[in-house]
Image (cartoon, grey):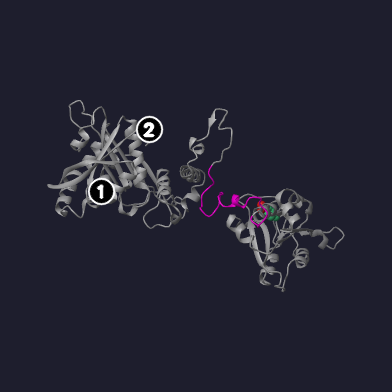
Amino acid sequence: MRIDVVSIFPDYLKVLDLSLIGRAAGHGTLDLHVHDLRDHAHDRHRTVDDTPLGGGAGMVMKPDVWGEALDDVLAVDAPTAGRQVLIVPTPSGEVFTQRTAEDLADADALVFACGRYEGIDARVPEHYASRGIEVRELSIGDYVLNGGEVAAIVMIEAIARLLPGVLGNPESLVEESHGAAGLLEYPVHTRPTRWRGLEVDPVLLSGDHARIARTRRDQAIARTVRRRPDMAASLDPTRLDREDRATLASLGWAVPTGAAHPVPVRIRTATTCDAEALADLAARTFPDACEQVIAPESIARHIATNLVPDLFRAWAEDDRVDLIVAELLAPQPVQEAPGGAEPEGTPTGPDLVGYAAVLREEPDAAGEPPTGIDPRPACVRARHGQVVGELSKVYVDSTMRGSGLTPALMSAVTRQATDHGTSLLWLGTHVTNKRAQKAYKRAGFRQAGTRTYNVGGQDAHDVVMIRRTGEGQ
Ligand code: JB8
């Protein structure tokens, strides 16, 4: 690739002779030429600037001087040189990203026009574009430099390292921040394994490559969510596997079924204020659990008598119940409405899209178990010395199927139940509901037996699954 740089400070570009870019120039991969703009100024003072037309602060670089300089290096009306791009660094340009670097690494020749003062007369890029030159006005970020030279150096380094033969180890290019995955890079470590009291994750020393890859992927996701919510919001769901989605959902970004991007969610402990929205959600989601096998009237009766706001209010107030909800967060308004008044209309409750509950089998002072707790099936009853909790519900709205919210809710409720002393979780799920059984199996549950469960007056046959909590979750 040939690169020409035009500047009033050609010495600035000397840094490029150092480092890997200089070495690439040595190989002939890169052919770098720096030109002094003042060679094209013909007055006694070699003037390159003049006052802005229309007034205003500072000075503007003269189009005639730039035109003469660029005519010398641009192949105007001579499309023989392959792809040539004129790059004008400017804080008012489009943002230069890794995608831009990848695109420009494909060109045969780049010409950088480095301005100073208030910039170059706007007719200069306009002129060359109209003469068929590919022109890009580019900014390296939302801050202002004193001139285009440093920006050009940044772009040249980002582009040149993508050229074949410039990097010693091209594999360094496959896994890096701002790559196609849309994630930041995971944190890296080297020996010593313990340094100033800081240990590295033992998984890195395990030799288990699948687990290492999973841990790193989760760290990359966590970093991206914390540091770059803008990147999290524009992740491509088709590049996210099931575990990515679970990690992402636990960190507050869920991918609605079929959506192009994740949306922000909050996974939190429920309060009594959620009771109405929870009853609505339960009524929407409960039929999914047994639709094919229980009569619609029985389902309706169960919902109307059991899944009512009072049940969820009682649960939210009961220490023995771990009740977790997933709330869809409203997209942040760009700007507050003028006047700042709240919009008219019905006050809206939380937008709940999932919930999970564990009911711990501790009698209260009056000897009563938590409201709604099921009798412990025989296959669970056999286990002594355990604090038993029923994983009563893990429901996710149909719009959020495959979003990662189910495992995220499951791990949130399990963590809280464990913190509150639960050592054995059990659940019943309809024998025909294979999707639920698979999800519970992935969460570490194993079948322990069966039970009969009454749904609105009709007996249903459930699989009973159990899972110990605590270490190794
Ligand atoms: C005059 O911040 B920058 C930048 C600033 C400049 C010029 C070019 C680029 C020319 N000031 O990227």
Q: Residue furthest front?
A: 207
Which callout, 1 or 2, points to the residue nearer the camera? 2
Overall secondary structure of the magenta section: loop
Q: Earlier in the sequence, mark 1 or mark 2?
A: 1
Secondary structure of the residue carrying numbered label 2: loop
Position of residue 340 relative to residue 43, above or below, is: above
Residue 60 drawn in magenta = no
> Is disc 2 surrounded by few (<14), some (14 to 19) or many (20+) residues within 10 Å?
few
Determine which residue is flagged by label 1.
280
Please state which amino acid type lies under the numbered disc 1: Asp
| Image quarter hosting the N terminus | bottom right
Q: Is residue 361 left or right of residue 70?
A: left
Determine which residue is flagged by label 2.
471
* Residue at screen point 51% across, 47% down: 228
Secondary structure of the residue carrying numbered label 1: helix
Quarter for ligand 1?
A: bottom right
Is 207 or 337 nearer to us in this picture?
Answer: 207
Visible residue check, residue 68? yes
| Image quadrant where residue 424 sits | top left
Numbered mark located on residue 340 in the image:
none
| Image quadrant where residue 252 sits | top left
* Mark pair 1, 2: CA separation: 35 Å
Can you give x and y, in whole percent of width and height, for residue 287 in the image?
A: 22, 52
Position of residue 25 relative to residue 108, above or below, is: above
Q: Residue furthest left?
A: 457
Can you give x and y, in whole percent of width and height, for residue 314 in the image?
A: 23, 36
Which residues are drawn in magenta? Answer: 162-186
Is 442 or 277 nearer to us in this picture?
Answer: 442
Can you give x and y, in whole percent of width and height, for residue 370 in the image?
A: 21, 34
Q: Residue furthest bottom?
A: 77
Ligand 1 within 8 A of label 1's CB?
no
